Image: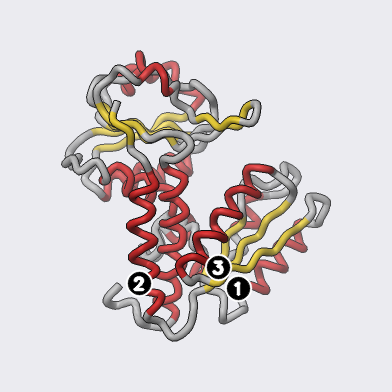
């Protein structure tokens, strides 16, 4: 398998953003809400802060103890919604189980939802970050994939449908399979030109379930004994033809770059200067 490394794709997006932001009179701003003490979330937020500041985006972090009340988080989001200096707001997921994640996410104003899922169908301006990153990674192999077929393995119908729409916008024939139905749909995987997974289950997919020449984008992440793994059994694909994104170092860096791209897009949109963006 050829490796789809995310670092080069991410670097190109970030370099372009840095150049654009340097020409602005004020800096775009991203606000992040972090709840609890999940180690992976701490790492992700730290990386977002580092990349944002490297390219000239202001970064504000609001921390909450896992024992806080849900309304406290929502009130902070409302405060950020009303702050004219803040262009983008994200809530770092996953949240502790006691919180209603969707209720909290829904509190973010559409104009500042830089993760993008709530505005995907309503405005078309801010694309969902994760699908956007996956498309960028697929494109990086310089192959013409229009007309090819793809299967998305997802934990929820909402995520599956969003990914399906994103792929179809690129001319890819797409469908999604829920994790619980995977065993009954192995044939679909075996016949797919593109397989994209974001479940978070180590070794969920192995090389025997894929065809030669496939493009595999592994968006899953699992931490085990201090090491990070994806959904795909990487070793079992080594002798195959095709492309695969590693975990870590694949989708992750591109996702952060696409998030910051959405922050800048929201900044331009607010300033009524997005007609040429």
Q: Residues within 10 Å of mark 3 (few under 14, many from 20)?
A: many
Q: Is 134 located above or below residue 31 in the figure? A: above
Q: Residues within 10 Å of mark 1 (few under 14, many from 20)?
A: many
Residue found 29% across the figure and 33% down from its top: 150
Frontmost residue, 47 versus 219: 47
Residues at marks 3 and 2, CA–CA distance in whole angstroms: 18 Å
Residues at marks 1 and 3, CA–CA distance in whole angstroms: 11 Å
Colour mode of the rendering:
secondary structure
Q: Is residue 18 left or right of residue 67?
A: left
Q: Is 156 located above or below residue 1 in the figure? A: below
Residue found 30% across the figure and 72% down from its top: 277
| Disc number placed over residue 19 in the picture, else none | 2
Q: Is residue 147 left or right of residue 58?
A: left
Frontmost residue, 111 versus 139: 139
Q: Where does label 3 land, which residue?
A: 30
Q: Residues within 10 Å of mark 2 (few under 14, many from 20)?
A: few
Residues at marks 1 and 2, CA–CA distance in whole angstroms: 27 Å
- If you read the primary sequence from the N terminus, does the residue marked by circle 3 or circle 2 appear first? 2
Find numbered disc 2 in the image and state the secondary structure of the residue it sits on: helix
3 or 2: mark nearer the eye:
2
1 or 2: mark nearer the eye:
2
- If you read the primary sequence from the N terminus, does the residue marked by circle 1 or circle 2 appear first? 2
Q: Where does label 1 land, which residue?
A: 81
The reply to whether dot 1 and dot 3 touch (C-beta < 8 Å) is no
């Amino acid at each position: 398998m050829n490796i789809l490394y995310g670092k080069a794709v991410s670097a190109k997006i970030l370099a372009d953003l840095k150049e654009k932001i340097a020409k602005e009179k004020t800096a775009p701003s991203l606000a992040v809400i972090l709840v609890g003490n999940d180690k992976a979330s701490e790492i992700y937020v730290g990386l977002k802060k580092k990349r944002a500041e490297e390219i000239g985006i202001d970064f504000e972090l609001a921390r909450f103890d896992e024992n806080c009340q849900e309304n406290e988080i929502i009130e902070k989001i409302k405060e950020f919604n009303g702050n004219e200096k803040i262009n983008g707001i994200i809530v770092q997921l996953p949240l502790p189980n006691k919180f209603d994640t969707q209720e909290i996410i829904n509190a973010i104003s559409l104009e500042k939802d830089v993760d993008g899922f709530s505005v995907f169908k309503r405005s078309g301006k801010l694309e969902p970050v994760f699908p956007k990153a996956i498309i960028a990674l697929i494109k990086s192999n310089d192959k013409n994939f229009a007309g090819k077929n793809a299967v998305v393995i997802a934990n929820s119908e909402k995520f599956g449908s969003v990914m399906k729409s994103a792929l179809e916008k690129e001319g890819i024939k797409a469908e999604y399979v829920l994790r619980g139905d995977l065993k009954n749909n192995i044939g679909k995987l075996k016949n797919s030109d593109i397989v994209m997974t974001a479940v978070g289950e180590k070794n969920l997919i192995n090389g025997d379930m894929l065809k030669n020449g496939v493009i595999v984008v592994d968006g899953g992440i699992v931490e085990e004994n201090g090491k990070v793994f994806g959904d795909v059994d990487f070793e079992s694909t080594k002798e195959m033809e095709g492309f695969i994104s590693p975990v870590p170092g694949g989708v992750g860096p591109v996702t952060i770059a696409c998030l910051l791209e959405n922050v800048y897009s929201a900044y331009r949109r607010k300033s009524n200067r997005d007609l040429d963006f």
